[in-house]
Structures are given as C-alpha cells and as structure tokens.
Image: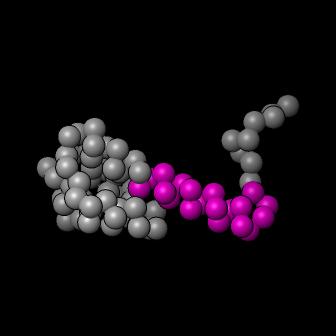
Amino acid sequence: MNTGAAGYKFKSEPFRRSHAEGEIRGEAKSVLKVLDARGLSVSDEVREQILACTDEQRLDQWLVRAATADSADHLFG
C-alpha cells in the first residue's frame, strides 16, 4: 500500500494551478540560488525578470545557463 503523496494528482483546478505556479516559482528561485552559490551578483532588474517568468522551458534554460554563465546577464543571451 502506498500512502505517500508523491504521485498524487490534484483533482481541483485551483489546486492544480496553485501547484504548477509553486513549481515555477521554485524553479525561478533555483536559478537565483545557483547564481548566488557561484558568487555572481544579480541586479534587482534581473532578479525581478527571473521571478516574474512563468515560462517553465525558459526557466529550465536559465537554470542550465546559470551553472556556467560568467554573469547573471548571460542567462538571457
């Protein structure tokens, strides 16, 4: 018997939407954490742009770029 919530699928649209928004917000925060861990400064403008992004694919690209970028501005190149 599996009693964990890992595979749970939300049945209510507001919960599904909230869950998806939370995942996207978490991805944006991950981009910022990687930049911070690498010692790269992030301007308020760039921070706002990252946190405002709702495109999961774009955030995935930025997360990968954050691992090797010379600066936070290079995420958007």
Farthest residue to the right: give it. Answer: 1
Question: According to the image, what is the colour scheme of the structure?
Answer: one colour
**Furthest-front residue in this view:** 44
Image: 7 above or below 21: above
Q: Is residue 28 left or right of residue 2?
A: left
Query: Residue shown at 23%/54% (left/top)?
Result: 42
User: Residue at (80%, 34%) from the top-left corner?
Assistant: 2
The C terminus sits in image quarter: bottom left
Front residue of this view, candidates 20 and 36: 36
Relative side of 1 to 8, left or right: right
Q: Quadrant of the N terminus?
A: top right
Residue depicted at x 64% and y 62% = 18
> What x and y, as percent, mark residue 46?
27, 63
Instruction: Specify the farthest residue to the top.
Output: 1
Asked if residue 26 shows in the view, the reply is yes
Q: Is residue 56 above or below residue 5?
A: below
Number of dots carrying numbers: 0
Which residue sits at x=68%, y=62%? 16
* Magenta residues, start to end: 10-28
Residue 74 falls within the magenta-colored stretch: no
Q: Which residue of the protein is positioned furthest toward the left in this rendering?
A: 70
Q: Is residue 9 left or right of residue 36?
A: right
Image x and y of residue 21, in percent:
56, 62
Residue 69 visible from this viewpoint = no
SS majority, magenta: helix
- Residue 37: name its quadrant: top left
Q: Residue 18: say if magenta.
A: yes
Residue 40 position, x and y percent, is 19, 46
